[in-house]
Amino acid sequence: MTVDSSVRGRWFSFARPGILVAALALSTLAPAALRADTFQSGITMSSSPTSTSAPSTSPADSVDLAPLREIYLASVRDGRAIARGLSEIERIRTRARPEAGSPLEATLTAYQGALVTLRAKHAAWPPQKLRYMREGLALLDRTVELNPQHAEARYLRLMSCYYLPGLFGRGGSVREDFAALARLLPGVRGQYPPAVYTAIARFVVEKGRLPAEQRRVLEATLATPDA
């Protein structure tokens, strides 16, 4: 792989120990907390978390995101799956033709960012790890900026940043995503498959250091049987 000389110059102007610390930190990206029960096999979700139940003939309204979720999970452990995930995103885009700014396009871009970020975990060369992380998080940040109410995009960004050490400066986005998810999740419970909602909400409750009232409301949604 050819590396731009300016990139090489910038990286090797830093102390080598700092690069190695960053590389080791990125190797912990998206660890075992992304369990298989987070996005279970066979789960299908509406492409639009904010869509209504009105019938539609648009291909974007019948997109099955379960294969993409499964590939994303596989990519945590196997870097070879990342290319398959990116190909699945393009396949969905070609078939469904999501409009720019639509919830489906936001979902696909968020997964694209999360997969590119996972390349940082599997890359061998430290500067390459940092480049992938920056590219992936830029996509996630832009998606959340344009779609702040998109719970799954928030969750993907949260999981991409939660285990990074403080030297990467992502504490602010982690706190923001926990707070946003605590606020959003009770209102979107019916728009997600039960297993997906439960996994996301449980992680937010267990790791989010929420205010007591937000915790109580979110825990109540987990305690209430699905209709």
Image: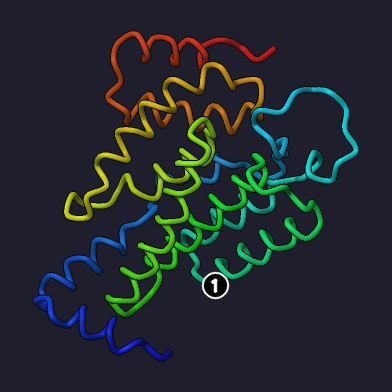
Q: Quadrant of residue 4?
A: bottom left
Q: Position of residue 227 (x, y in %)?
A: 70, 12
Relative to 227, residue 175 above or below: below
The image position of residue 32, as x and y in percent, is 40, 49
Q: Residue at x 21, y 85 (%)?
A: 9
Q: Position of residue 113 (x, y in %)?
A: 49, 56
The residue at the point 43 percent across, 10 percent down is 217
Residue at 66% over, 30% down: 193
Judge left or right: residue 76 versus residue 133. Answer: right
Residue at figure coordinates x 84%, y 23% from the top left: 54
Q: Secondary structure at mark 1?
A: loop
Amino acid type, label 1? Arg
Q: In the rendering, at what x and y percent does residue 36 appear? A: 54, 46
Quadrant of residue 83 within the rendered picture: bottom right
Q: Nearer the viewer, residue 49 or 208?
A: 49
In the displayed orientation, state which residue is furthest to the right: 57
What residue is pinned by disc 1? 80
In-image side of 157 versus 61 (left or right): left
